[in-house]
Image (cartoon, helix red, strand yellow):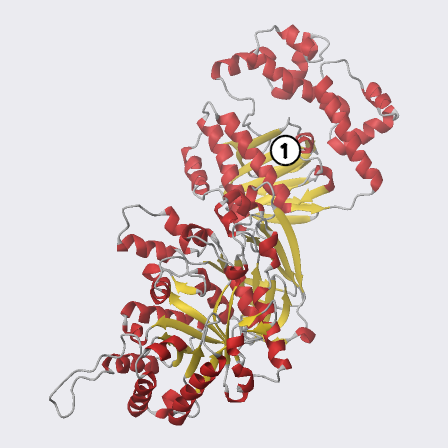
């Protein structure tokens, strides 16, 4: 059995048809660039084909056989060098066979291929910075295999002590190789017998003490030969050899050339110390083949994901055990999409957005404001016609026809100020309802929800508000008895009270069909506070307010459907911060929780309408917009897309995941919800430090072949602002570029087939507030 020893590390590219059994005192990475080969080790055979990667652990006996076309990159890293870089080296082994790694490791494997290809290309180019480039890539390779592929092995306390001892011995040799060291001297230093020390050293290092010491001395002598003008005798003496003859013999035995010829060759060519070497029996070098460079460069196209190498990278494990006992129904709340005025539905852009929204999250109501006070209903026109051919309801008829044909209902929000300040408001409302029922039928209007809204800041008397509501309800119910007339309730969750102006509705609750409330988390936040405590404290703001409101109503004997029509999660307080603060998981998890507590949720269709209604161009935080300008989808759009995509029964639910079982298979949503000051969202380092890798293992799946679809939604995959920031100009961008930006701002999607026996696991690299949504669709078989 042949054993080959090298110093520190070695990168080679070769073709192997046959390699007999051997072992190496270190870790080896194999990367197949072309063809195929089989590696035998530990009683198993591993078939490696193009792009495959395999790690061979320290002191493992292995052999290789391959076809005539294979091209193999091999990176060998000695135990000693690895241990010097990573103190816990002997506490782990590294498991990586690209055909068998869990889902989610694809990007890591892609980056490993990239780094190994770069190392080889740097050697091929032989540039003046090749050595530095190779070593830089080497350290990134080490970091990635430590971070993503290490596996703990059981160690007893005695063996852990042995690890410390061997490190101490190797470090001593590295710093004293020029001295006359002997095995007996080293054994005495460690209070061990020479025979035990000899066995112990070979067990951990893989070679005997004398050979290791010689290799260290030769490694340093090679540098002296190239970078100094000292004589052969001086170099031999400096590096611990007794005579020049002894040095020359050891050098030629190891490197197949004399020290003098090595010096002449390398001083002339200036080749860095790390050599690509021709291998032994069954291999040959193909470094001079230009085709190899082409094959390697294709692996260098992918940009390095620096988040994989972040200093504060954290890794967590999540085990999901779906059980019949934990089954519960998945709730689907009603959705109100506010478009502004009724006539806005006639705007082709808004209509397109409404249709896109309905296809992704299902719309129940189109929310409208300013019905009478706005510009939808046209002013009366003086005419001498017996029957006027110009109807004041021309716009409203077209708009309502569109809403009805699309299968939606109307959610009409009527502000008390509109009633008070529009002349003959109730007369105009009666006329509008009469006309609408005449044209579209009573059944259509019966499905409407009409909300009487008096803001909490109102100074109006409670009895006046009661009278206005009573009049409004009487007018509506007389014409469409089954339509729902509700009231906005301004609830103070801290004091657990309502405003004095709204106490009237407690006595009239039996007549009220539903209750609306708001929950804008941003009103509870001091954005000047740089600490996270202020933001973490309000983490469960929406659920706390909702549950306290329900408890308050329950004490009053009131049980009515609740509609949270105006709400928002934490957001930024400027356009820049609002754009950089990615919050998909905040929205997703909030909706999941609220869906069990409220009847419906409201959303604005887009920024433009929201700001126009509020007559402001500042950041408006009392609602969530589905679209940015130019049909760009905001995070809430995709967060709701994933929420509504869930169906079936919940079989597992936790603070960072939700799993359902349905007739087609399973769905798993994994999210990294984190509350922090949005101002930190502009700090790339902060975001990387608080991202994490999650290893998810799911037990007790039904054995079958599955088609697995995986969506990844984070600030790099699906967030519009990140693309807008990268591709922009102070002079503006044309429509074609804007369409491209929007088309690329979509969640990443992967699909593959896999046979699952019972347990399935995958990895998910989770940016802050990212969502990973996985669907396992069972493949039906006739067998």
Where's residue 419, x and y in %?
36, 80
- Does 658 sit above or below residue 768? below
Where's residue 477, x and y in %?
42, 91
Question: Considering the numbered disc 1 on the image, is that residue within a helix, a strand or a loop?
Answer: strand
**Residue tagged by mark 1?**
77
Q: Can residue 742 be seen in the rendering of this structure?
A: yes
> How many numbered circles does the render carry?
1
Crowdedness of circle 1 by 10 Å Cα count: few (<14), some, many (20+)? many
Left or right: residue 626 versus residue 281 is: left
Left or right: residue 420 versus residue 697 is: left
Look at the image and tell me in which quarter the N terminus lies: top right
Look at the image and tell me in which quarter the C terminus lies: bottom right
Where's residue 286, x and y in %?
48, 32
Left or right: residue 181 versus residue 264 is: right
Question: Residue lying farthest left?
Answer: 384
Q: Can residue 18 be seen in the rendering of this structure?
A: no
For this rendering, which residue is in front, 34 or 760? 760
For this rendering, which residue is in front, 552 or 234? 552
Q: Quadrant of residue 739?
A: bottom left
- Does 664 sit above or below residue 634? below
Q: Quadrant of residue 359?
A: bottom left
Residue drawn at point x = 50 percent, y = 85 percent: 512
Where's residue 8, x and y in %?
63, 28
């Amino acid at each position: 059995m042949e054993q080959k020893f090298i110093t520190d590390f070695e990168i080679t590219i070769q073709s192997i048809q046959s390699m007999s059994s051997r072992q190496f005192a270190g870790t080896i990475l194999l990367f197949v660039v072309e063809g195929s080969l089989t590696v035998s080790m530990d009683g198993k055979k591993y078939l490696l084909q193009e792009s495959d990667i395999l790690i061979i652990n320290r002191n493992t006996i292995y052999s290789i056989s391959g076809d005539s076309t294979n091209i193999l990159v091999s990176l060998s890293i000695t135990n000693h060098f690895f241990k010097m870089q990573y103190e816990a080296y002997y506490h782990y082994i590294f498991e990586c066979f690209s055909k068998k790694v869990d889902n989610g490791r694809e990007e890591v494997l892609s980056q490993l291929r990239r780094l190994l290809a770069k190392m080889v290309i740097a050697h091929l180019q032989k540039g003046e910075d090749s050595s530095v480039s190779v070593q830089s890539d080497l350290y990134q390779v080490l970091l990635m295999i430590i971070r993503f592929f290490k596996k703990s092995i059981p160690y007893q306390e005695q063996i852990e002590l042995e690890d410390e001892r061997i490190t101490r011995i190797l470090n001593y040799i590295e710093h004293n190789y020029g001295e006359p060291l002997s095995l007996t001297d080293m054994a005495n230093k460690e209070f061990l017998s020479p025979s035990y020390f000899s066995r112990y050293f070979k067990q951990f290092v893989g070679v005997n003490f004398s050979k290791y010491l010689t290799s260290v001395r030769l490694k340093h002598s090679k540098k002296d030969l190239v970078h100094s003008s000292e004589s052969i005798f001086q170099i031999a003496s400096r590096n611990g050899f007794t005579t020049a003859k002894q040095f020359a013999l050891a050098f030629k035995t190891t490197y197949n050339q004399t020290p003098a010829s090595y010096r002449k060759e390398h001083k002339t060519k200036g080749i860095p110390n790390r050599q690509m070497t021709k291998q032994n029996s069954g291999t040959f070098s193909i470094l001079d083949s230009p085709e190899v460079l082409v094959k390697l460069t294709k692996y260098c196209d992918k940009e390095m994901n620096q988040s994989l190498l972040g200093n504060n990278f954290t890794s967590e494990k999540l085990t999901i055990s779906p059980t019949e006992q934990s089954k519960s129904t998945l709730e689907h709340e009603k959705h109100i999409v506010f478009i502004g005025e009724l006539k806005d539905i006639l705007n082709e852009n808004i209509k397109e957005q409404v249709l896109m929204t309905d296809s992704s999250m299902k719309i129940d109501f189109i929310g409208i404001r300013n019905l009478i006070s706005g510009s939808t209903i046209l002013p009366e026109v003086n005419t001498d016609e017996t029957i006027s051919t110009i109807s004041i309801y021309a716009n409203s008829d077209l708009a309502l026809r569109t809403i009805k044909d699309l299968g939606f209902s109307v959610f009409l929000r009527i502000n008390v100020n509109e009633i008070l300040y529009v002349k003959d408001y109730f007369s105009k409302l009666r006329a509008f309802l009469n006309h609408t029922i005449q044209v579209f039928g009573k059944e259509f209007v019966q499905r409407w929800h009409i909300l009487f809204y008096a803001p909490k800041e109102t100074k109006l008397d409670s009895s006046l508000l009661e009278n206005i509501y009573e009049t409004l309800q009487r007018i509506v119910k007389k014409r469409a008895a089954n339509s729902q007339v509700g009231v906005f309730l301004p609830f103070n969750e801290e004091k657990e009270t309502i405003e004095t102006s709204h106490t009237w509705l407690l006595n009239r609750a039996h007549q009220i069909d539903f209750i609306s409330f708001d929950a804008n988390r941003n009103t509870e936040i001091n954005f000047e506070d740089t600490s996270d405590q202020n933001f973490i404290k309000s983490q469960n703001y929406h659920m706390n307010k909702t549950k306290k409101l329900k408890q308050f109503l329950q004490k009053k004997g009131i049980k009515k459907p609740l509609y949270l029509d105006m709400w928002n999660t934490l957001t930024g307080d400027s356009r820049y911060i609002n754009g950089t603060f990615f919050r998909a998981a905040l929205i997703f998890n909030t909706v999941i929780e609220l869906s069990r507590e409220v009847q419906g949720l409201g959303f604005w269709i887009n920024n433009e309408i929201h700001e126009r209604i509020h007559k402001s161009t500042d950041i408006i935080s009392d609602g969530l917009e589905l679209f940015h300008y130019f049909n760009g989808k905001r995070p809430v759009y995709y967060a709701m897309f994933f929420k509504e995509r869930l169906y079936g029964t919940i079989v597992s639910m936790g603070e960072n995941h939700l799993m359902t079982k349905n007739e087609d298979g399973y769905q798993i949503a994994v999210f990294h919800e984190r509350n922090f000051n949005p101002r930190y969202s502009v700090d790339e380092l902060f975001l990387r430090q608080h991202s994490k890798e999650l290893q998810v293992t799911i037990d007790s799946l039904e054995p079958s072949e599955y088609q697995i679809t995986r969506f990844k939604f984070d600030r790099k995959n699906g967030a519009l602002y990140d693309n807008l920031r990268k591709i922009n100009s102070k002079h503006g961008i044309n429509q074609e570029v804007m369409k491209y930006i929007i088309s690329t701002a979509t969640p990443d999607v992967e699909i593959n087939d896999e046979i699952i026996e019972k347990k399935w696991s995958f990895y998910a690299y989770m940016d802050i507030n990212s969502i990973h949504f996985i669907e396992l669709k069972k493949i039906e078989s006739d067998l």
